[in-house]
Image: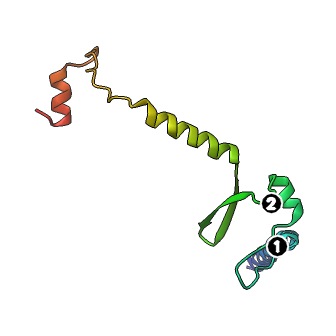
């Protein structure tokens, strides 16, 4: 039985070392992400650091979409070009005045009969 106690002790020590490593990795991650911590003023405004604005190509008057997913706030730049393209597409789609597709499909029951398909679907 002394061997079993030694194995348990070794496993316990290994588990403690593993948890310590995981905790240290978590702390390292948190500390490295603190450099982008920003403060929100009384009116709810925040200022994105210049290196982030530059990386995203945001300039004065630029717009971002804001989404809330769980406890995360997601900011994504909105391209003016994208807005213009969507507006052009919408204008075109409205101007086409397309009619609904009404042509009946050609029947090609190569591997089963129409009656069999209706029975399987509960239509007959």
Q: Quadrant of residue 19?
A: bottom right
Image quadrant of residue 20?
Answer: bottom right
Q: Earlier in the sequence, mark 1 or mark 2?
A: 1
State how far apart marks 1 and 2 are (Cα).
Answer: 30 Å
Depth-wise, is mark 1 or mark 2 nearer the camera?
2
Disc 2 element = loop
* Nearer the observer, 123 or 100: 100
Q: Which residue is mark 1?
A: 30
Q: Quadrant of residue 58?
A: bottom right
For the N terminus, give its image quadrant.
bottom right
Q: Residue at x 66, y 69 (%)?
A: 72
Residue at 75%, 77% (x, y): give it: 8
Residue positioned 15% across, 31% down in the render: 119
**102 and 63: which is toward the camera:** 63
Q: Position of residue 105 (x, y in %)?
A: 28, 20
Q: Secondary structure at mark 1?
A: helix
Seen at 65% across and 44% down, the residue is 82
- Classify residue 105 as left or right of residue 18: left
In the rendered image of this protein, does residue 121 appear above or below residue 76?
above
Q: Residue furthest left?
A: 124
- The percent position of residue 31, horizontal first and vertical second, equals 87, 73
Q: Which mark, by number, is residue 60?
A: 2
State left or right for residue 29 relative to residue 95. Answer: right
Display colour scheme: rainbow
Question: From the viewer's perspective, is 71 left or right of 94?
Answer: right
């Amino acid at each position: 039985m002394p061997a079993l106690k030694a194995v348990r002790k070794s496993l316990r020590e290994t588990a403690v070392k593993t948890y310590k490593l995981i905790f240290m990795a978590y702390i390292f991650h948190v500390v490295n992400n603190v450099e982008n911590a920003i403060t929100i003023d009384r009116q709810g405004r925040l200022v994105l650091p210049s290196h982030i604005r530059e990386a995203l190509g945001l300039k004065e008057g630029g717009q971002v979409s804001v989404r809330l997913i769980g406890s995360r706030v997601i900011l994504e730049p909105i391209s003016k070009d994208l807005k213009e393209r969507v507006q052009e597409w919408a204008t075109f789609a409205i101007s086409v005045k397309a009619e609904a597709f009404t042509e009946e499909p050609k029947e090609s029951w190569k591997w089963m009969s129409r009656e069999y398909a209706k029975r399987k679907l509960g239509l007959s």
